[in-house]
């Protein structure tokens, strides 16, 4: 598994097909042909999307016999989730609370 | 090597920028809300049902430090320790801070706040945060969440 890297994670998820693939895999492992099924896309195109997902660390795959099985790698998502939940959302809420505070006390802190 | 081993020794770098316009106030007023414990109590450390403020100190000057310990009702203890690197009254604040979660250092970040007057009145705030997110995140729980929920958040972020 590639080390979880947020830049790669975001790049990987910036594509609707890859997001759909990740959504499918979040429900459980799937073979490459199962992943390709919903799309009017060639198998090589799907394999290319899969390579991007694997490079990001979101997905890993292993070949057993003639079937390559893909599954989610929760570690990468969980790091991304931590980032959003704990930093950005908190900062957003704080700036909104600052706005509320400034509306209530436009001329200075309450004495 | 297992995924757990990788997570424990992982560093992720991230940047985000948030912008807000606050009508009817001056840039100095926004700055003042950052410049004292009284000011920050109105928003940054606003009391809520989920936590109690523990240790709280602030020395608002270049080289000065700020510390905030949060005792969360679920038992979690968070520590925020900052050092101010740049302060321009009414215009800019830059500080570096580390976050600890139950004693584990989880991130070291640079926070920059730029404040500008808006033509016609009001103040515009740009908050840029650059962070190194360190090993030590507790992964328990995250894995139990639905991946779909996580993805929705990411998608919402990417689509901005």
Image (spheres, coloured by chain):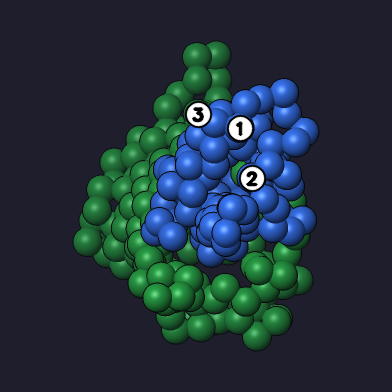
Q: How many neighbours does mark 1 have within 10 angstroms: few (below 14), some (14-19), or many (20 or more)?
A: some
Q: How many neighbours does mark 3 have within 10 angstroms: few (below 14), some (14-19), or many (20 or more)?
A: many
- Secondary structure at badge 1 equals helix
Q: Chain of mark 3?
A: B
Out of B96 and B88, give the one closest to the viewer. Answer: B96
- Which x, y percent locates residue B152? 71, 44
Spatial CA span between label 3 and label 1: 50 Å
Q: Chain of mark 1?
A: A
Seen at 50% across and 20% down, the residue is B118
Q: Are marks 2 and 1 in contact (CB under 8 Å)?
A: yes
- The quarter in which the N terminus of chain B is drawn is bottom left
* In this view, B104 is above or below B121: below
Q: Are marks 3 and 1 on the same chain?
A: no
Q: Are marks 2 and 1 on the same chain?
A: yes
Q: Are marks 2 and 3 on the same chain?
A: no
Q: Which residue is mark 1?
A: A43
Q: How many neighbours does mark 2 have within 10 angstroms: few (below 14), some (14-19), or many (20 or more)?
A: some
- Which x, y percent locates residue A82? 56, 61
The chain coloured green carries which letter? B
Seen at 50% across and 34% down, the residue is A48
Seen at 69% across and 36% down, the residue is A36
Q: Which residue is mark 3?
A: B124
- Which x, y percent locates residue A62? 53, 59
* Left or right of A14 in this view: B61: left
Q: Colour of chain A?
A: blue
Query: Residue B71: which quarter of the image?
Result: bottom right
- In this rendering, does residue B97 appear at all? no
Spatial CA span between label 2 and label 3: 49 Å
- Secondary structure at badge 2 equals helix
Q: Which residue is mark 2?
A: A32
């Amino acid at each position: 598994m590639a080390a979880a890297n947020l830049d790669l994670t975001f790049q990987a998820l910036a594509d609707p097909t890859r997001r759909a693939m990740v959504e499918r895999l979040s429900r459980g492992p799937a073979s490459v042909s199962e992943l390709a099924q919903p799309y009017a896309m060639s198998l090589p195109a799907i394999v290319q999307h899969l390579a991007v997902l694997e490079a990001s660390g979101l997905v890993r795959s292993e070949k057993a016999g003639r079937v390559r099985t893909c599954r989610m790698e929760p570690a990468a998502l969980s790091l991304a989730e931590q980032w959003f939940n704990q930093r950005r959302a908190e900062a957003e809420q704080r700036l909104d609370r600052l706005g509320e505070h400034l509306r209530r006390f436009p001329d200075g802190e309450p004495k | 090597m297992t995924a757990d081993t990788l997570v424990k020794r992982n560093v992720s770098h991230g940047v985000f920028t948030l912008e807000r316009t606050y009508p009817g106030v001056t840039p100095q007023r926004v700055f003042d809300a950052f410049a004292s414990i009284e000011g920050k109590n109105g928003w940054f450390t606003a009391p809520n049902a989920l936590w109690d403020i523990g240790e709280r100190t602030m020395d608002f000057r270049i080289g000065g430090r700020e510390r905030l310990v949060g005792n969360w009702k679920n038992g979690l203890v968070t520590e925020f320790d900052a050092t101010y690197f740049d302060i321009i009254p009414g215009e800019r604040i830059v500080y570096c801070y580390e976050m600890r979660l139950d004693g584990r250092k989880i991130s070291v970040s640079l926070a920059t706040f730029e404040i500008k007057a808006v033509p016609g009145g009001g103040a515009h705030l740009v908050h840029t945060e650059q962070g190194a997110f360190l090993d030590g995140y507790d992964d328990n729980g995250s894995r139990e969440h639905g991946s779909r929920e996580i993805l929705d958040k990411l998608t919402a972020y990417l689509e901005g």
